[in-house]
Amino acid sequence: MITDPTERARRVQTMFGRITRRYDLMNFVMTGGRDQAWRRIAAAELALPSNALCLDLATGTADLALAVRARFPDSRVVGADFSETILRAGVAKAARKAVGGVTFAVGDALSLSFPDATFDGLVSGFLLRNVVDLRRCLRELMRVCKPGSRVVSMEITHPQTPVFRSLFALYFNHIMPVIGGVISGDYNAYKYLPTSLAAFPAAEPLKAIMQEVGFREVRYRLLGLGSMAVHVGIVPHP
């Protein structure tokens, strides 16, 4: 296990660059084809006002940014990611689909370049599990959003039902890394996934951490038989 935060961040950044070509296919395979539906659910949880400016952080290939635009057609979305390689794939996808209202930027979730209270909402998919300092990241998400706005996180989680927890562990820890390695050609990248989840808080502890750093009215919704969690927190007023 890598203990140095800087080295871990560098390796995660490099890893996402390596798996970009098969990233969308692997998301489809790993979620049983439900990944796009779950993104639509996460996007809807933003409850954006008219003409909103939204940040999709860790946008990757931009599927969540496009889901926000589809759900809120008058919104503007900034898709940010710290991997320039996968970000270029998102730019290309938005252009290919001729979706307007989406711009892109390179950004580190622990130190964003945006001013305080810039966004009317923020959404992320598969971000929090990959950051080296969860609390610092959550505070940074809160900083760049306007008071009263929503921060929405979609992330893999530990199923709560004992039977499915065991089945999920078998699939996620042993079967999925093999499938991911075959499809992507990068076995090490998909060995990282079980390791990252093992070190990540389950849904209820994550809710408590969000409350601890200052989010209000924190709640979550479990999807995929409890293997995916969509957390929602409201940015407090000063």
Image: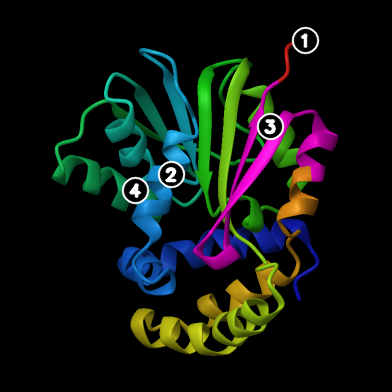
Badge 3 density bin: few <14, some 14–19, many ≥20, Cα 10 Å: some
Q: Which residue matches tag 1?
A: 238
Looking at the picture, the colour scheme in use is: rainbow
In percent of the image, x 38 and y 48: which residue is there? 87
> Which amino acid type corresponds to the residue marked 3 in the rendered image?
Glu
Alpha-carbon span between mark 3 and mark 4: 23 Å
Q: Earlier in the sequence, mark 3 or mark 2?
A: 2
Labelled disc at residue 161: none
Q: Amino acid at mark 1?
A: Pro
Q: Does 175 appear in magenta?
A: no
Q: Tell me the element at label 1.
A: loop
**Residue that lies at the very extreme toward the right in this rendered image:** 212
Name the foreground residue: 34 vs 7: 34
| Corner quadrant of residue 228 | bottom right
Cα distance in 3D space between marks 1 and 2: 29 Å
Mark 4 or mark 2: whose residue is earlier in sequence: 2
In primary-sequence order, the first of circles 1 and 2 is: 2
Tell me the number on the disc at residue 140.
Answer: 3
| Residue 170 image point, x, y percent | 60, 87
Q: Is residue 224 left or right of residue 144?
A: left
What is the C-alpha distance between the residues marked 4 and 1? 33 Å
Q: CA distance from mark 1 to mark 3?
A: 15 Å
User: How far apart are the alpha carbons under marks 3 and 2?
Assistant: 23 Å
Contact? badges 1 and 3 (CB < 8 Å): no
Q: Secondary structure at mark 4?
A: helix
**Closer mark to the observer between disc 3 and disc 4:** 4
Decide whether residue 229 is among the magenta residues: yes
Which dot, 1 or 2, sits closer to the camera? 2
Q: In the image, what residue type sits under mark 4? A: Asp
